[in-house]
Structure formats: structure tokens, C-alpha cells
Amino acid sequence: MRVRSIDGGVVTFTQPLRTDVSLAWSPELQTHEVVEEVGVEHLRIEFIEAPYAGHLNEPGYNAITFSAVADSWVRDVTIVDADSGIFTGSYVKGLTLQEIALEGRQGHHGIALSYSADILVRDFNIANAWAHSLTVSARASGNVFSRGAGAEVLVLDHHGDSPFENLFTQLSAYTFVGSGGEECTGPHGGARNTYWNLVAPMDVPLLWGHVQSNVVGEGLIVSNALTEDAQWYETVSTLEPANLYEAQTSRRLCGDISDACNLGVYAPDTASCSLAPRPRSTACDDGDPDTDGDACSEGVCAGTSASGCSYDPAAPGRGSSPRKPKRSRA
């Protein structure tokens, strides 16, 4: 967590806590030094050609590791013939890993997030096989895997010690078989991990679905189970929004520019907001009491006059005299 302010005995963070904290537990605040705004980009890392030594017998051809790092990145990096690709460890927060390509022989961990929070892994391609393609473990939380594909079935490895509230959205074919970790760390996954609009058929968590796991999309391999305090498995065809992370980011960063007929959309590549028209026939209010049946069309709210004529303020000559569009705030 980042501290926004300290006022006497009141500490305010920049974001909500993900778990409850009780003073009865005698909680403590600890500080940690981190490196900020460093990155690895536009690089190809290629190890010697050697057969895979086998699970837990790897000599350690590992490409990139982050520890005690915040607000940093890996971008446009190809990793070939690695035992493991990218690791994160303790005190890591706010990384962006994008345009990552993993190639070559089989390996152990492709991309593994442990003890880490708020990491975005997007636009990645995994061409080779891994014992664990994408790993979350050791209380990793708030992390997102988005728009990823694999030539092999992606192994979504939940490695124990309660990785929780992680999101997997718009990924290619996947499985939970291959989730590892030691038995003493408890169930593979913690609470509220979410799997949204992955390629069908959508699998469900093997042994830990009851801890409020969410699986939503097309072609679930199980029946719907819409519980309030346990699993939420829901089959939805043509799921909207297609990408839950991008929709939530747009709402948080671009919501102020949205209106009744336009939606603020965040573009990750340019870090900017733009307006996209809401669907035609979305109900709205054109601000004219003499019209009814108001609905959106191409980002403009238009109603029908009492005479039955369609009034479109963006089209002079139709219905009433032309005037500027009246948009209601959403």
C-alpha cells in the first residue's frame, strides 16, 4: 500500500485495503524501500540450447526477476529457451508487463507473480509449453492477466498461500490442471479470483472454487452456481464488456467525460480517454419537454415531436429548427 497522509493516529492510504483489519489483532505498519520507475524493454533474451532438465531439476536459466520494485515495466521482450521467464517477489507493486513473447523449449514458470500486488500482464504470447504458464502465489493480489494467447493450453497455476482477487480476462484456451505448491500452504487459490470471458470451454477452479471464485463467460463446463458467499459460475453468451479490466479502468479514469449517449473509454496504449457512442436506442433525455421516445443515435440524444416527426438536433431541416444537441449527464 501507498500512504497518502498521516494525521496523528490516522493513516490514509491511496486505495482501499483488500482485507479487513481489526485493532484486536494488534496490526503494525512497516515501511519498505523500493526502486521506482525502472524497466526492461526492446530486448531479446536467449539462453543456450539445452533440453529441459525436468521439473525442479532446472539449472536456473531464468530471465527477469523483480524484488522491491514499484511502478516499473517490462515491454517488448522476447525470452527464448528459459527455465523460467519473469518472476516477481516481495514488495513489488504496480508493474506493467506487456508485449512479452515466450519461445523455445519447455520450461518451468512462464510468468510468476508472488508476494506482489497490482501488476498488469497484457498482450502476451506464449509459444512453448510450461509446467506453469501463468502463476499467482503467496498472497499475490489485484493482478491482471489480459489479452494473452498460447500455442499450448495455458496453465493457470495457483500455487498456494492464498493468491486472491486476481483477474484473468480475454485469454486463450486454459486449464487449472498443473496448479502446484506445497500442501502446507493450504488451498491453491484464495478468495475472489475472477475468470472473465476466456476462450470456451471455460474451466472452473479445481479445489478452491468455493472461496468466492467467479467464472463468467461462454461455454462453462459446469452448470450455473450463483451463490452469495461461495462460487459464482455463470454462462453468458456474447459477454459484455468483453474485457473486464479495460471496462473497469474506463469507468474509473474516464467516467467524468461520459454522458447519456457516450461512454468514456480508456486506451492503454496511449494512456488517454476518448468518447465512444453508446448503443443505438439507449434511453436518454434530449431536454425538450415536447418530445418523447428519446433515444441515442450516433452519440446524440434525439426525441420524436408530438407531430410524429423525428427530431434530431444534429440534422438541420428535420422537425424543429436546428439547435445545439442537449446532452444529459449520465
Image: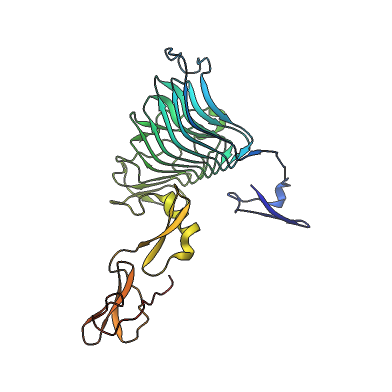
Q: Residue furthest right?
A: 8
Q: Quadrant of residue 152?
A: top left
Closer to the camera in the image, 1 or 277: 277
Tell me where residue 294 appears, x and y as whole percent: 30, 77
In the rendered image, residue 196, in percent from the top left (x then y), is placed at 39, 46
Whether residue 149 can be seen here: yes
Name the residue at 50% across, 57% down: 253
Question: How many numbered circles does the render carry?
Answer: 0
Q: What colouring does the structure picture have?
A: rainbow
- Look at the image and tell me whether residue 160 can be seen: no
Give the quarter of the image for residue 330. bottom left
Q: Quadrant of residue 289?
A: bottom left
Left or right, 291 with reference to 82: left
217 or 256, which is in the foreground?
Answer: 256
Say which of 29 and 105 sits in front: 105
Spot occupied by residue 203 in the image (x, y as percentages of width and height): 35, 38
Front residue (pair 320, 307): 320
State the image coordinates of residue 262 (x, y, percent, origin top left).
38, 65
Q: Residue at x 30, y 73 (%)?
A: 295
Give the residue drawn at x 45%, y 49%.
270
- The single residue placed furthest to the left in the displayed view is 308
Task: Please indicate whether residue 196 sits to the left or right of residue 112 in the image.
Answer: left
Relative horizontal placement of residue 124, taking residue 183 as reference (left or right) = left
Task: Say which residue appears at 34% left-offset and 37% top-offset.
Answer: 172
Q: Is residue 235 above or below residue 7?
A: above
